[in-house]
Image (tube, rainbow, N blue to C red):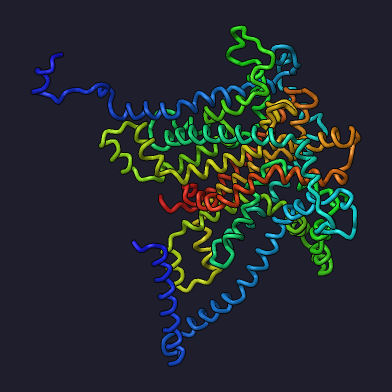
Amino acid sequence: MATKKEEKQFEKERKAANKARYKKMKKEGLEKYLTPEQIRYNKNQKLVGMVWPIFRFFILFGLSFVILYPLIFMFSTAFRPSDQMSDPSIIWIPKTFTLSNIKDTWDVMRYDSTILNTIRLNLISSCLQVLTCSITGYGFARFKFKGKNLLFAIVILMIIVPPQITTIPLFMQYRYLFPLDLFGVQTDQGLIDSSLTMYLPALFANGIKAGLFIFIFRQFFRGLPKELEDAAYLDGCGPLKTYIKVMVPNAKSSFLTVFLFSIVWYWNDFYVSSSFFINNSENQTVALALKNLDKNLENQLFQNQSVSIRMIIVWLESGCILAIAPLLVMYIFLQRYFIEGVERSGLVG
Amino acid sequence: MSKTKTAGTKPPKQKGLKIPYERRKALYGYGFIALWAIGSIYFFIIPLIKSLIYSLYETKVAEGGLQLTKFGLHNYVDAFRHDQNYSKALVSMLQHTALTTPLILIFSIFIAVILNQKFKGRTFARAVFFLPVIIATGPVISIINGNMSTGGYAGGSEQFSTMFETNLVDQLLNYLGIMNISDSLSEIINTLTTDIFNLVWNSGIQILLFLSALQNIPFSAKEAAQMEGATAWEYFWKITIPYISPMILASLVYTIVDSFVDPSNEVMEIVLRKSSQEWQHGYSAAMAWAYFAIIGIVLAIVVAIVNKFVYYEVD
């Protein structure tokens, strides 16, 4: 097998040869070699090849602007003093820069403790989730058993049913420690406001978007050649050992993709965490802090006066920056894996 | 059983081999999914059934759980016949989804085809277009959206809103005099132009899916098309679309589900308000279930129709 570099070299040489041949053909008169249709086709292709990149540039540039606009706006507002927000002479670049917005927001969000808590919650849940979802996905991909289709239908149902339907009964289960309350166990608030409400579902492959992850893993494992397993079985591995020693190393890229997406979804989740965590508790996540930011700002910076968005926008935007900064940093470094991972993870087919 | 007797006639039996191979594998299969199965009973099935039960009762919050009274379908009847907002929100939600889903799909196929071509700065362009994937699911998007929709009040975003909300297309259509020919067409064009922000921000995952499908088109198909002298247009319809059609189905389902379960859509807002602020859990559950049933029906119809046109290479 030629390496990538060599392949590139071949491609280059092939193109150069083609060009040289075409030049030679042109010299001797194209009509000798090609039919009129072919000549027209080539001309059209050449024209498209010249015009299209310009179009493409404009389309991509315009749409990139639409996507990047809120981010640029965020950075432009977060560092400008609040009174310069209503200055009509300022559009993008403020006259003076200030870090006080960030500092105020930092205090209101209790950012240092919040972010540590979020990272802890996030990493533990994502790791558990990836682990258990991959095991389940493998079970669905490679074993035949009764009721498999029915069980897989539940996985599909998990993807489709919105979490809003199950939240309230789940809340009751956590609050009264469901199977235990039948035996007379009573607690103050049960599992509510404890990180276990995140860890436990993740441990049992039922965390946020778990259905989707099981589905991805199943598709991926189905795409791996069966011979891999047969070889492992012949060498005397049991299924579990085969899974750990043979399948997992082969599924690395898929694991990484699911792990990254899991981190993103846990990081951004505010619905599930807002249902099971008490507002402003020690356990709050960054997303939750951001969700409550406007109320907390009113409380702490404006002495409970109600304020319009216009007045607190600088703090809101700095809150946004604080909330997505870790994700953005991660994305910049691992962007490759987000994109390539999905391509390789066998989501297709 | 003595060792010496069996050794001559049969190979020595190993422990556990009594269960036939197939059965044993099946058992291992159950083992692999056991964790999930237990979990989904507790975290998914029971809550699901419970909420279905709630939806049939009048609920009252009491010590030790919910007090259930008055069994019957009255919650569902109320939702559709007495609630002023619910059916209205439902209809507008369906309309909105029917309008934006095809737009998102077409748009993301288009972008994916572009991002699949070779050009300078492709990595950067891809990075930018997938950025919504990591941001759009979080609360940040609602603040961003707030900036956009409050337009004039939110300070610096005026330029943006004027850029996308002046309805230049509307005026152009009026000017050309074709505004009145087809209202639905102009509505689609209007959605496309005024809502381009939401369109772009909601199609990150779909672009990702289509891009991965595009890269799986075998090179031989490309080569054959070139040999036959296919134009880019023909290539797109005869090669690209059939090959990515399974992904079209997948992203269609994803888009519909995504737009239905988005906590910021109208119906979801009503459902959540009823349960979290007005404490009418039973009523809220009934609304959610009716809503979910409608999603199910819509999805089933769409999948059944689209599935006819999907091309699977391995058959």
The picture quadrant where one finds residue A50 is bottom right
Q: In this view, does B80 lie above or below A47?
A: above
Q: Nearer the viewer, residue A121 or B79?
A: A121
Identify the residue shown where x is 82% and y is 56%. B161
Using residue B26 as the reference point, say whether residue A193 is left or right of it.
Answer: right
Is residue B22 in sight in this rendering?
yes
Towards the viewer: A296 or B65: A296
Residue at 74% x, 34% y: name it. A110
The reply to whether residue B148 is visible in this rendering is no
Q: How many labels does the image show?
A: 0
The N terminus of chain A: image quadrant: bottom left
**Horizontal relation, residue B210 to residue B3: left or right:** right
Q: Position of residue B47 (x, y in %)?
A: 62, 23
- Res A29 quadrant in image: bottom left
**Residue plotted at (55% across, 79% down):** A46
Above or below for B64 versus A86: above
Measured from the top left, where is residue B126 in percent x and y? 59, 58
The answer to which of A51 and B168 lies nearer the viewer is: A51
